[in-house]
Every structure is written in C-alpha cells, then in structure tokens.
Amino acid sequence: MTEEYDVLIIGGGATGAGTARDCARRGLRTALVEKGDFAEGATGRNHGLLHSGARYAVTDQESAGECIRENMILRRMASHCIDELDGLFVTLEEDDLQYQQLFIEACRSAGIRADAMDPEEALRLEPSLNPGIKGAVRVPDGYIDPFRLTTANVMDARNHGAVFHTYTEVVGLIRESDRIRGAVVRDRRSGEKREIRARVTVNAAGIWGQGIAALAGISLTMFPAKGTLLVFGHRVNNMVINRCRKPSNADILVPGDSISIIGTTSDRVPYDSLDKVAPTASEVDLLIREGSRLVPSLAETRILRAYCGVRPLVADDSDPTGRSISRGIVCFDHGQRDGLDGLVTITGGKLMTYRLMAQKATDVVCSKLGIEAPCTTAEVPLPGSGSKEGLKAGRMSHRAAMARLGTLAGRIPEEGEMLCECEHISEGEVDYAIRELGAGTLSELRRRSRIGMGTCQGEYCALRAALRLKAAGKSDDFVKKDIMDFLDERWKGVRPVAWGEALREAQFSSWLYEGVYGLGRDGSEKEDAQ
Amino acid sequence: MRYDTIILGGGLSALVCGISLQEKGVKCLIVSSGQSALHFFSGSFELISTDGSQREAMENLPDGHPYRKIGLDRVMELSKSVPEFFTRAGYALSGEYDRNHVENTILGSQKQVWLTVGSEGFPPVRGKLPISPLGVKMQMDLRKRFEILGGDYLMGDRAVRGEFRDGRLASIFTENHGSSPFIADKFVMATGSFFSRGLVSTPSGICEPVLHLDVDYCSDREEWYGKGFFDNQPYMRFGAVCSDRLEAVREGKVLPNVYVAGSLIGGADPIKEGCGAGVAIISALYVARQILEESL
Ligand SMILES: Cc1cc2nc3c(=O)[nH]c(=O)nc-3n(C[C@H](O)[C@H](O)[C@H](O)COP(=O)(O)OP(=O)(O)OC[C@H]3O[C@@H](n4cnc5c(N)ncnc54)[C@H](O)[C@@H]3O)c2cc1C
Ligand SMILES: Cc1cc2nc3c(=O)[nH]c(=O)nc-3n(C[C@H](O)[C@H](O)[C@H](O)COP(=O)(O)OP(=O)(O)OC[C@H]3O[C@@H](n4cnc5c(N)ncnc54)[C@H](O)[C@@H]3O)c2cc1C
C-alpha cells in the first residue's frame, strides 16, 4: 500500500511540526513521519530559552535580529507556550564591566531593548542573584515550552488535514532519476515497511538530517554539539539569568513551570554516537560550580535530573573539513544545490526560530509546486493561544491546566482527582491528553502534560497515570511494561545526580515499584535495558 | 534522663526491639523522628524471596549479609518466634514462619511473601502520598504496646549526636532537648537506610549522621548505581559496618554497647533478595536477645 501527498516531512521536532502546520495551512496535502514521539529529539532536550537575541548580539547581529523578531511574533501566536519573564545579563566580580557597554550597543543595533540597571535594582528584581554583581542589563528574554509548542503545531496542522505517523522511521528515499519521490518508512512497532510518496520531501530530521541526506546520496555535514543541562527541584529564579560576557559554559539559568534549568555545556561528539550521549559527572560538576557563581543558592538546591541534547548545527558548506559551522538557519533546495529535485532540507537555527524555518521551507516547497498561498503562521495564533476571555478557572489544577493548555483548558473538566501534586495535574487533564493529544504511553503523557517532570520525577504519579491508561483500554501487561520503561527513562536522568534527596527518593521509588508493586525485569528484559 | 536501653529510630526494627526488651522488663526509650518504611507497607513481611525452602535460599546470600552474621540457623530459629510476637501485639499474621506464600500486588504481579498482615495494605493510590493505612495502623499499635509495657516513646524528635567515653557511647542528644543528655547502658541504632535518613549521601560520600558510625560503600560514585532502574543497585547494600554480634563500629573500633538493627545494617539488598522486614525483625530480635543476656 502506498500513500501519496504533496509534501512529506521527515522529523517531528518543532521544525517539522511547524513546517507541517505551515504547509497544511497553505492547502498542501501534508504528511509527517517521526521515528519516535514528537519532540523526542533536540526539541525536547534544550533549555527552553525564548531568546531575545541578546546572547548573540555581540557576535552575530543577523541571528540576534532573527531572534528578536521571532520573539515578538511568538509572544502573540504561541502565548500559551511562553512565559514572558524578561532576562538579566549580569556582570560578576570577575567579569569585565566594559563588555556591558559593547553588549548594550550591540543589542540596540539589532533592535533589542536593553536597559542597564545598578546592582541594587537587579537584586531587588531577582533576589536569587549573586550579591556581588557589578551590573545588570534587562532584556526581553523568556521561557518557551517546547513540548506544548510542538503539540500545538501538530494539532493545528491536523485541523488542516495533515497526517502524522509517529514511531515511523525513514529508512530509504524513493528516487526516480533526478528526483526524490517520497520515502520508504518502517513502522518501529510492527517492523513493517511501506512507501509514502510525495511531490516534495522535507528533511527536518535535525541532527539526523545528515543521515537522511546520505540516503539520498548527497552530502550534508552536521556538526553535532552536545549540551548538558541540570534541572533544579524548585523555581530558584523568576527571570532568565545570563552572564554578560561572551557565550560560554553554564551561563544561563532559565525558570520554567515549577523548576529552574542551568545550562549548558558544549562539546562536539561523533556523529555515530548521537543515540548514546549521556550527561557525565564532570559536566554535572561544572554546571553546579559555574551556575552557583550566578546564583549562589544553586550549590545547595536539590537537583532533579541531568539531561543532554545535541544541537543540529551544520558545518559550513564551503569548508570541507567540517570545522567551521554556520550558525543560522540552513535551508537547502537540493534541486539547486545538488541537482536532486524534490528534496528540501531545513535545519540549523534554534527552537526560537522554528516558525521562520518552517516558513522558509514551506516557501521553497510552494514555489516548487507552483502554489502561491501566503504564510499565515505569524498572524494566526496556535490552538490554545487565542483570547482567554470567558475562560475562568477556580481550582488550582484548573488554573495550572490553563497555564499549560491556554484556551484548550476549557476542554477538560473542572472537577476530578488531582493526579500529580508537584505540577497540579488533574485526572481530567491526563484523560484529555490520552483522548485528544494521542498520548498512549507514560513518556508520551509526560511530553503532553508534564506528568513526571516535577519534583517527584513520576514517583507518585506514574502509577496513577498508568491506571488512567488502563482505564482507556490498555492491557495489564502493556501498562506494567510501560511503567518500567518510564522509570528506566527517568532513572537515566536521575543517576548522574543521585545523591542526597535524589538518592533517597530513588530508594523509595525502587521500594514502591519493585518491592511493593512487584514490577521487575526477568533475564530477557534486562538485556533490552542495557 | 537515664534508661537501660535507648533505641534510635521508630520503624519496625526499633519497635520490635523495644517491645521485646520491655516484655522482659528492660526500661527502654525510643527516639523517633517520624515517618518510617512502615508507612508504605505492602501488607506482607518478606524474609527471603524464594518459592522453595527459605533456609536453602539463604545459602546463596553473599558474605557480609546480616543473616550470615546472625547465623542462618539462628535466623530460622528467631523467625519461628515471630508469629507469636505479633499475636501478643494483637496481630494474627497469616502464613507460615518457614514457608513463603504468594500475594498479588495491585498491578496484578505475584510476590513470594513470608507473613501477611492484610492483603490490601496498599490500596490504589490516591491523595497526597500513597500511604499505607495498614502500615500506619500497625506502627501506632506497636507503639501503643511498647508504651503499655512501660516503654517511653519520644515522638517527632531527632537524635543529633552522641557523647563517647572510654570507647563507649555514654549519652545521646536530640534536636528538641538541646543540651540535656539521654543516658543509657546500651543503645540500638535502628535509624533505617537512605529513605529514613539513617544514611545520608553527598556527591563525595556516605555517612551515618548521628554517631558517625563506619559505613561500608564504594568510593567511586559511578559504582553506586545500576544502569537501568530495575538492575541491581549497589547502593542498596550500603550500610553501617557491624560485628557478627551486630555491634556498631566507629573509626575502625567496635563500640561494645551500641548495636545496629534493621535496614541501617549494610550487606543486604532488601529488594532483590526480598528480605526487608525479615532483616528488620530478625536483627531486632537478635539484638534484644543479646541485651537481655548481658543484663542477666
Ligand atoms: C543543549 C541544547 C540547548 C538548547 N537551547 C536552546 C534554547 O534555549 N533556545 C532555543 O531556541 N534553542 C535551543 N537549542 C536548539 C534547539 O533545541 C534546536 O535547534 C531545535 O530543537 C531543533 O529542532 P528540530 O525540529 O530541527 O530538530 P529535532 O527536535 O532534533 O527534530 C528532529 C526529529 O527528526 C526525527 N528523525 C530523525 N531521523 C529520522 C528518520 N530517519 N525518520 C523519521 N524521523 C527522524 C528525530 O527523532 C527528531 O524528533 C538548544 C539545543 C541544545 C542541544
Ligand atoms: C517505602 C518502603 C516500603 C517498604 N515496604 C516493605 C514491605 O512492604 N515489606 C517488607 O518486607 N519490607 C518493606 N520495606 C523494607 C523496609 O526497609 C523494612 O521492611 C523495614 O520496615 C525497615 O525497618 P527499619 O526500622 O529498619 O527502618 P525504617 O522503617 O526506615 O525506620 C527508621 C526510623 O528511624 C527514624 N530515624 C532516622 N534517623 C533518626 C534520628 N536521627 N533520630 C531519631 N529517629 C530517626 C525514622 O524516622 C524512622 O522512623 C519497605 C521499605 C521502604 C523504604
């Protein structure tokens, strides 16, 4: 059986989901395949910083300008995914205060509001700061939730007819002379292969885009840069905190929902190790050491987990060694670049610029297909980001749901049990994610509702959420295996920071799930977990 | 305040030890900082996980396991007295002292268990924390029995340090009682594992925070953990070093009047071996027996 579309998008990160939305809204028959779940790649493993562009102002005016323009657009059309916090760029005792002047000028010339303030005022705004700071500059940084953003794009694309296949991996491209005509995909659950044909195929596979290009027989050299981050157990700061110096390690602290995240490191990793990267003890130590220079209380704050992602940077086309990287958005029409028509690659950029990337890719697709429909994604709000008028929330869980789902919170019942105390997630919200957002496993529920992301890391709520999956028709065996997979995944992030309270909670979790509920792997399953 | 024996910790091990001693008229104080593992009790005690002979299964336990220190025959002998002990406390346990039976968990898995208090110890989880009403009730009932027998129970107070004299522990101090010492001939440390803060870990090491007893653990943090959540977790076996008589060790020297009981003792993996309550109860009975013998 083959399916036929105008456009097939490879990759269900923010870029792919955004491209699907744009294509579908312009009337294209659109399909997207993702080898795992939505936002399982870099999109779900970053810092969630809604850049103002200030971070790049001194080194890269073009990226800075792109950021501030998209920043202003996203505040409108993705409002329910964004926390408008503002950010401070602080100068520490050991940093050069002269850089501040250069920084402010660069911000202003890129169109970024940048207001200098004295240390007292900064400390009043953000009491968690190192009291020894020499100065601070306020910029319009914010927090953007990548999971909500991706989900909302998928939802809107679906509303416009797009078709999504998760756990569906591209294993080959259909090539007819000098054209790509779609892809051969493998269903990762059943193992079955099939063809999906399309007039244009978009490679939005992020860092894995190099492999997709290789399937087409063309060369695209990615520059995989691993970054590690730490999640702290509560919201330490209220504004984004940056260090006012040239971008470096561990110099951004972003508050999001109930937690704060410090990051990042940056190390090139071999392309063939992409699926094996894990945070190391020395990265963890460095993040704590450097982070507590910015905010001293971090040294004593409980760490919930460590995680890492790989930035989809592209090696400069003109440099065959692959050592110089292009920082901005990369959009290749392979018809023009390599004489292979029907294939477009969209990568590089940032989460922040996903919409612009999607627009660029869709423009190319449309020009190939001779379609003139204009892009509307900068004007039309995402589902959930419309006007909140008329919506009211009484209970705590419903207020929290409104913060997460925006106007879509109207779709979940007000009453009902609380399922996750750390994040105030009700049973109704979980049921909604199962019913309407296609969450069929605990990990999918986590990405669609924040279950397991807060202080308890799923310790208390995983079982309760699993019982909702069971109520929705999953079998006992499925639910048991799913809980085990979920706990394994959570443990991966806890292990690098498992001391103090985290170890205490880990022991408790083991007791609960293995000791009391009797879950465990027999010999054969153990092999898979390795 | 002066006692014959002071027990630190308020979980299963502390209570079993305290009750055994009070039953024989040894004047005890229990100092408990609060919640214990009993609050999350499944409803069944485990001695060792096996569907065959328990005694034989114990042969496979590693050296240094608390059952090995106590002696496997003595473990079985002490376990024989357990149903009686709980009957006296008002709990008729089902199951045999020397044979496991099967209980279902709420996820439909089956578990080999030793003695069962009630089958729905852990009802489907609701509310703030998944607390076991059965375990909470048992904790209260055991405490009541201890007090009726004449024991003093200091609730919600934390032992913070001890004072040593001539290689022995002379007294302990608690959070709420500041500089007034609690003095006794014998002491029992039953403060639990990491979960109850009987052990405390930092990125660089693990300690027993009250008396700074010697703790057995590997120094390389990478070796504390298994890769998968359900793999062996070496940290589960970390615990206080003790002699074969379960006397505590501090700075390499045995403390002759301090015993260790329950999950604070190292060497066991209560989850993989299915020996949580077994170690707690049997070690408590063993310690109590020795204290009684010494006070004759
Ligand atoms: C540590 C770190 C911190 C960052 N911080 C920020 C930040 O604060 N702000 C910001 O704006 N940006 C940040 N970024 C950058 C941002 O995360 C990425 O630029 C962005 O998420 C890329 O999205 P994407 O959709 O292009 O790629 P991805 O999210 O990686 O999506 C690609 C998808 O393609 C799928 N795929 C791969 N191969 C196949 C195949 N063969 N078949 C089917 N599907 C396939 C993958 O599973 C994946 O889901 C950060 C990145 C990292 C690593
Ligand atoms: C969540 C959980 C569930 C379990 N469920 C079961 C089960 O269903 N069946 C089973 O066989 N085993 C179970 N176990 C194994 C359990 O370890 C044993 O069964 C047993 O209950 C341990 O008893 P304990 O007295 O050694 O330690 P704990 O129960 O941990 O008690 C230690 C006590 O010491 C107190 N304390 C700690 N420090 C101080 C201090 N400085 N001063 C004063 N008091 C202090 C604590 O507040 C606590 O009350 C479970 C363990 C856990 C952690």
Image (spheres, rainbow, N blue to C red):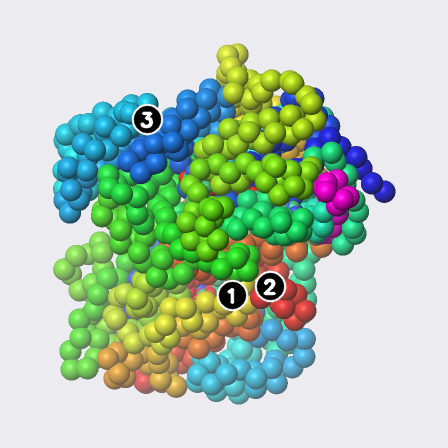
Tell whether position B16 is magenta.
no
Please provide the residue range marked out in magenta. Answer: A175-189
- Quadrant where the image shows the N terminus of chain A: top right
Q: Chain of mark 1?
A: B
B269 over A451 or under it: above or below: below
- Residue that extends furthest to the right in the rendered view of this protein: A1
Tell whether position A176 is magenta.
yes
Rendered location of residue A441, percent (x, y): 64, 46
Q: Secondary structure at mark 1?
A: loop
- Give, as a three-letter code, the residue at label 3: Ala
Q: What residue sits 32% from the left and 85% below the top?
A: B294
Q: Quadrant of residue B224?
A: bottom left
Rendered location of residue A497, percent (x, y): 39, 58
Mark 2 crowdedness (10 Å alpha carbons): few <14, some 14-19, many ≥20: some
Which one is closest to the eye, mark 2 or mark 3?
3
Q: Are marks 2 and 1 on the same chain?
A: no
Q: Chain of mark 3?
A: A
Question: Is label 3 within 8 A of ligand 1 (CB to nearest ligand atom)?
Answer: no
> Relative to A505, is A341 on the left or the right?
right
Q: Secondary structure at mark 3?
A: helix
Q: CA distance from mark 2 to mark 1?
A: 8 Å
- Give, as a three-letter code, the residue at label 2: Ala
Rendered location of residue B174, percent (x, y): 23, 59
- Give, as a three-letter code, the residue at label 1: Lys
Reading the image, the residue beneath label 2 is A529
Q: CA distance from mark 2 to mark 3?
A: 49 Å
Reading the image, the residue beneath label 1 is B227
By secondary structure, the bulk of the magenta-drawn segment is best described as: strand
Is residue A431 visible in the rendered image? The answer is no
Reading the image, the residue beneath label 3 is A110
Q: What residue sits 48% from the left and 36% below the top?
A: A329
Discs 2, 1 touching: Cβ within 8 Å: yes
